[in-house]
């Protein structure tokens, strides 16, 4: 077998270097592909988290708006109800003096009795206070 010439050795060396460079480029491409995939997934995740946060913020703002509206409405209803409850006794008392058998007064008493039934039992806090009073104690 004849000895290889310097050109052949250079060609073989260049071929090996080219092959190694191609393999290295392929490895870099594979590693880069994985990194690009991770970057893409990270970008998609960040965008999804941002959309989710925006949706949650909008939902929370909607709940707060509804709660504020309900609070205002409840305050208005409470004021109206308090005024009606305070106005009824003097009007009913005056009407009883004029016409104690007035059917409108009987109906109002029935409606209010149904809406606000009297509870003949004492509250537990009052029962506890009454038990603390010593029988026969002078004040």
Image (spheres, rainbow, N blue to C red):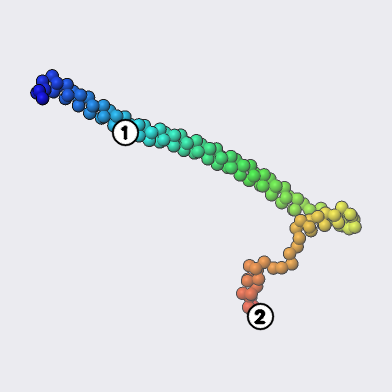
Camera-nearest residue between 94 and 40: 40
Is the residue marked by circle 2 packed among few (<14), some (14-19), or many (20+) residues within 10 Å?
few
Q: Is 124 placed above or below 88 here?
A: below
Residue 137 position by quadrant: bottom right
Instruction: Return the x and y of residue 6 as percentages of the image width and height.
Output: 10, 20
Residue at 71% across, 68% down: 121
Tag nearer the camera, 2 or 1: 1
Instruction: Return the x and y of residue 127 as percentages of the image width and height.
Output: 65, 71
* Figure quadrant of the C terminus: bottom right
**Nearer-N-terminus badge (2/1):** 1
In the rendered structure, the answer to whether residue 46 lies left or right of residue 70 reads: left
* Figure quadrant of the N terminus: top left
Query: Disc 1 marks which residue?
Result: 31
In the rendered structure, the answer to whether residue 76 lies left or right of residue 31 reads: right
Camera-nearest residue between 22 and 86: 22
The outermost residue toward the front is 1
The outermost residue toward the bottom is 136
Residue at 59% across, 42% down: 63
In the rendered structure, the answer to whether residue 95 lies left or right of residue 55 reads: right
Query: Disc 2 marks which residue?
Result: 136
Dot label at residue 103: none
In the rendered structure, the answer to whether residue 43 lies left or right of residue 69 reads: left
Q: Is 78 placed above or below 6 here?
A: below
Instruction: Return the x and y of residue 61 as percentages of the image width and height.
Output: 56, 39
Camera-nearest residue between 47 and 125: 47
Q: Is 47 placed above or below 118 here?
A: above
Residue 138 position by quadrant: bottom right
Residue 13 position by quadrant: top left
Instruction: Return the x and y of residue 129 as percentages of the image width and height.
Output: 63, 71
Residue at 14% across, 21% down: 8
Residue 106 shows in the view: yes
């Amino acid at each position: 077998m004849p000895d290889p010439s310097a050109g052949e050795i250079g060609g073989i060396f260049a071929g090996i270097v080219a092959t190694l460079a191609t393999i290295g480029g392929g490895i870099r491409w594979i590693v880069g592909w994985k990194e690009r995939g991770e970057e893409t997934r990270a970008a998609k995740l960040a965008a999804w988290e941002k959309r989710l946060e925006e949706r949650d913020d909008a939902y929370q703002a909607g709940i707060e708006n509804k709660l504020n509206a309900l609070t205002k409405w409840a305050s208005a209803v409470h004021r109206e109800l308090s005024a009606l409850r305070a106005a009824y006794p003097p009007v009913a008392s005056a009407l009883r003096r004029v016409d104690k058998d007035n059917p409108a007064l009987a109906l109002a008493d029935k409606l209010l009795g149904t809406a606000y039934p009297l509870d003949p039992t004492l509250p537990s806090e009052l029962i506890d206070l009454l038990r603390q009073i010593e029988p026969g104690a002078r004040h």
